[in-house]
Amino acid sequence: MRNLTDHVRELIALEGPITVERYMSLCLQHYYATRDPLGSSGDFTTSPEISQMFGELIGLWMLEVWNGMGRPSPVHLVELGPGRGTLMADLLRATRLLPDFAGAAQVHLLETSPSLRQRQQATLASSGHAIQWHENVDDLPEGPTLIVANEFFDALPVRQFLATDRGWCERLVGLEGDRLIFGLRPEPETALGNPLRQDDVLEWPSASIDILQALSRKLARDTGAALIIDYGYWGPAFGDTLQALKDHKPVDPLDEPGEADLTTHVDFHRLAQAAATEALRVHGPSMQGDFLQALGIEARASSLKTRATLEQASGIDSALTRLTERGATGMGELFKVLAVTHESIEAVPGLPYLSVS
Ligand code: SAH
């Protein structure tokens, strides 16, 4: 593939500065298409890569929700952005507890990266399920559907606006000589109203909202549930959360376009609002630590340890701590869990029912 830096420079030279959203989109496509970003040799590590307990407990969550739905068959089991396919593999193993579910479940993966599709195929080859891949949520088949998305929404591009004395001005990426720099569109975006405080940054996750609205329409029509796990906050809040990670370390997002992972923190309130427009219920958000505790992660760890060597047991303990740890940077607190379900599903495991306004 051509060097993305040259491509971005040429694009800006031809068309003028591009939005942060377009820049992110170009970088992310290249980034995910050209590597396996996960694990200790990659740029970041996710919960399913830390421990099998994560996917297994989500599998039990799916079983319980499916039971509550009256055990529809077939049921479409969908994962958005499955990475290496580890979560789905662990989830499917746990759901073998109920052979009826294994018979009913049809697995669909939403993945744009050809190299990660290959990786997922290899991971899931022994799962006993035929896997179908899709590019877009609109391509998913009709029928009752259970969806999971872990660290998917943080990997989608966002628009950014800076509060100026003229109003909210969109952040752009432009050129100074050969160097990429951030800039601002001079005219404000009047639809956003007037900012209260100068220098606030507003992030607008249009791609996430579009996907959530499409999923919501589907869940309202076909029934089912979506479980969303990611790092983020309950907005509204202002701040620039755009971050680039390479080799597990933060780098400048404009350095080496397409070679670092670009992410933003997920505003769960906005996602909940995008879902609240349909005949749906929103459950949560809870902190990941509380959610996993409620699903019984301690008991699962103890049971795994009865068959483990001393070294494995200490690995299980440290994974348990990592997934549930409190504190601003602990995954148990930084990561939140939200579920969106058809209105007929009144309760889901591990999450309180929420009335969104
Ligand atoms: N869920 C996995 C991986 C998270 S990384 C885990 O927890 O380990 C983000 C994943 O989303 C990757 O698989 C990436 O290729 C995929 N992805 C990113 N943007 C996407 C898009 N627009 N559509 C579909 N998949 C996308």
Image (tube, helix red, strand yellow):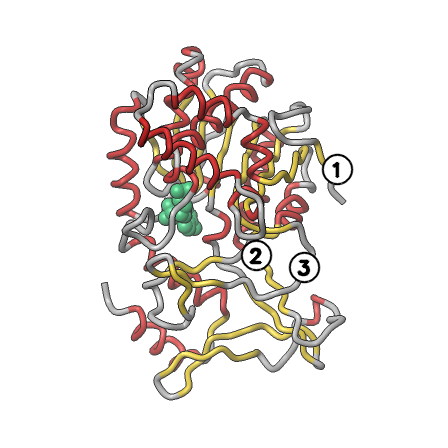
158 or 143: nearer the eye? 158
Q: Is residue 173 visible?
A: yes
Which element is circle 3 on?
loop
Mark toward the start of the polypeptide (3 vs 2)? 2
- Which quadrant of the structure image shows residue 311? top left
Query: Real-space Cα distance between discs 2 and 1?
Result: 22 Å
Q: Which kind of residue does numbered mark 1 sit on?
A: Ser
116 to 32, vertically: above or below: above
Judging by the rendered image, the residue that carries numbered circle 3 is: 237
Q: Residues within 10 Å of mark 3 (few under 14, many from 20)?
A: few
Judging by the rendered image, the residue that carries numbered circle 1 is: 355
Asked if residue 285 lies left or right of residue 129, the reply is: right
311 or 250: nearer the eye? 311
Residue located at (35% from left, 68% from top) = 257
Which element is circle 1 on?
loop
98 to 334, vertically: above or below: above
Residue located at (38% from left, 52% from top) = 44
Mark toward the start of the polypeptide (2 vs 1)? 2
172 to 290, vertically: above or below: below
